[in-house]
Image (cartoon, rainbow, N blue to C red):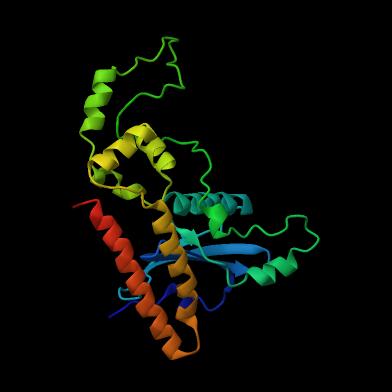
Amino acid sequence: MALPSPTSICKACLVLREIIHTNGLQIWKLQLHGSIGMITHAVLEKLSSDFSLHSHYQTFDFCKESTATVKQYLVRYFEDRKQEGYILLQDPLWEFYDAMSVGLGGGTDFLDIDSYFELPPSTSGVNQLMNQPNQNNAPEDGNKPQKVPLSAQRERTGKLKLKDFAGYLHLPIEEAARRMNICPTVMKKICRRDGLVRWPYRKVRSIQRKIVNRSKSLSANDAEERDRARVEILELQQQLANISEAFFG
């Protein structure tokens, strides 16, 4: 038996904000609950975009936390979803808060899809697949970092295959190469060697956009429109799956 949604037993709270992200296959929905001027807790729901699986819920208690702490949590949450390739859907309450923010000087911070894919320079460690040292930071003892011999670098890159790139398809190839700590030219050569003519970032992004647009119809009043949206989303998800499978062939 499915457990009740935490939101269904949270009768005394107002839903202050609803933040929805999707990557075309999964949906993350974060609701902030509380009252005017106070955030008491957040409810995170994870589900498949075709709603074929049971939802998974997590609750975060902010009753004893400051507003600054909640803001830091949200900044990390947004950054994590961005790094994982999720797209932000428009907040259902956006128009309300846009109207309420007039005169505050902050304007609207709604993040559209185009700006969402423009990743900022990473300030934390990236995936060090090649296990190379960071050339930008010298050791504390003042000695210069030891460079990896060119022969060792070639040996490592020579072992890379398409399947090693499968987790980066939602990124431009230059950004994917940076995260893997290899040269974009080398990455392109590996792709061509293994039969991949074109890096699928643009195609993946296009499919994700279509899924985002059709996902809006999943809450339509017309049952037939909801059914059509589910069918189209499943077809688009299959296209994404086919692209991923090509990297494991």
Residue 186 on image: x %, y %: 32, 33
Quarter-of-image position of residue 210: bottom left
What residue is shown at x 41% (from left), y 75% (from top)? Answer: 5
In this view of the protein, which residue sits in the foreground, 243 or 195?
195
Reply above or below: 1 against 236.
below
Q: Is residue 208 left or right of residue 14?
A: left
Reply above or below: 79 against 124.
below
Quarter-of-image position of residue 70: bottom right
Residue 168 on image: x %, y %: 36, 47
Name, please, the residue furthest toward the left.
249
What residue is shown at x 49% (from left), y 71% (from top)? Answer: 213
Number of disc labels: 0
In this view of the protein, which residue sits in the foreground, 43 or 228?
228
Quarter-of-image position of residue 99: bottom right
In this view of the protein, which residue sits in the foreground, 242 or 17?
242
Reply above or below: 198 against 40.
above
Residue 217 on image: x %, y %: 48, 79
Residue 3 on image: x %, y %: 34, 76
Reply above or below: 148 against 3.
above
What residue is shown at x 43% (from left), y 84% (from top)? Answer: 226
**Do we see residue 181 in this rendering?**
no
- The N terminus lies in quadrant: bottom left
**Do we see residue 10 in this rendering?**
yes
What residue is shown at x 26% (from left), y 31% (from top)? Answer: 157
In this view of the protein, which residue sits in the foreground, 10 or 53?
53
